[in-house]
Amino acid sequence: MLAQLITSFIASVGFGIIFNAPRRSLLQCGIAGMLGWMVYVLLYTHINPIAATLIATFIVGGISQIFARIYKTPIIIFSVAGVIPLVPGGLAYNSMRNFVENDYAAATALAAQAAMLSGSIALGLVLSEVFNQMIRRAAR
């Protein structure tokens, strides 16, 4: 588990560097990615991967909102880097490999799973923004 947390931190920081995030925000990018991956790993064995991804992405979105307010930086910097460990790149790769190998049944199943995971990432980010807006309106 510790190795996974470290690698998810490094991956998030790496993508923060690739996307030209300010240097002062790279630590927070790594924390967001590491926290999202930790939530995913803890939930993965208890609920299905799509729900685990949705909840983990919601957490990443929430921590990104907090970091954006504290450090006066756009939310997108933290949320993009934070969801990188959750992106189903391996599934998408295996899906395309199976298409090339003419194993269409396996390719379609993997592509559908990758699409559902990608959709849960998008939905988690949207829900965290909606939740943030609800809290802001209630605080007024």
Image: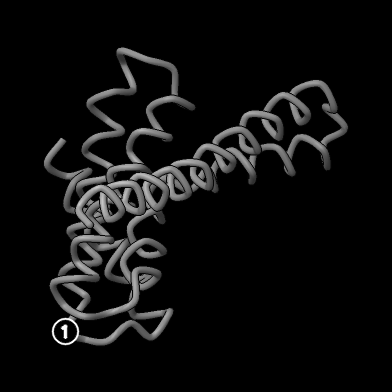
Of residues 93 and 66, which is closer to you in this image? 66
The quadrant in which residue 45 appears is top left
- Give coordinates of residue 118: x percent, y percent: 57, 43
Q: Is residue 106 left or right of residue 91?
A: right
Q: Which residue sits at x=55%, y=36%?
A: 117
- Give coordinates of residue 88: x percent, y percent: 52, 43
Q: Secondary structure at mark 1?
A: helix
The quadrant in which residue 115 appears is top right
Q: Residues within 10 Å of mark 1 (few under 14, many from 20)?
A: few
Q: Which residue is mark 1?
A: 24
Q: Is residue 94 left or right of residue 139?
A: right
8 shown above or below 67:
above
- Give coordinates of residue 2: x percent, y percent: 12, 41
Residue extending farthest to the top is 46
Of residues 6 and 74, which is closer to you in this image? 74
Of residues 45 and 125, which is closer to you in this image? 125
> Residue flagged by tag 1: what amino acid is it?
Arg
- Give coordinates of residue 33: x percent, y percent: 27, 54
Q: Which residue sits at x=24%, y=35%?
A: 39
Q: Is residue 61 left or right of residue 9?
A: right
Q: Quadrant of the N terminus?
A: top left
Label count reads: 1
116 shown above or below 68:
above
The quadrant in which residue 59 appears is top left
Q: Which residue sits at x=76%, y=31%?
A: 107
Q: Which residue sits at x=34%, y=76%?
A: 74
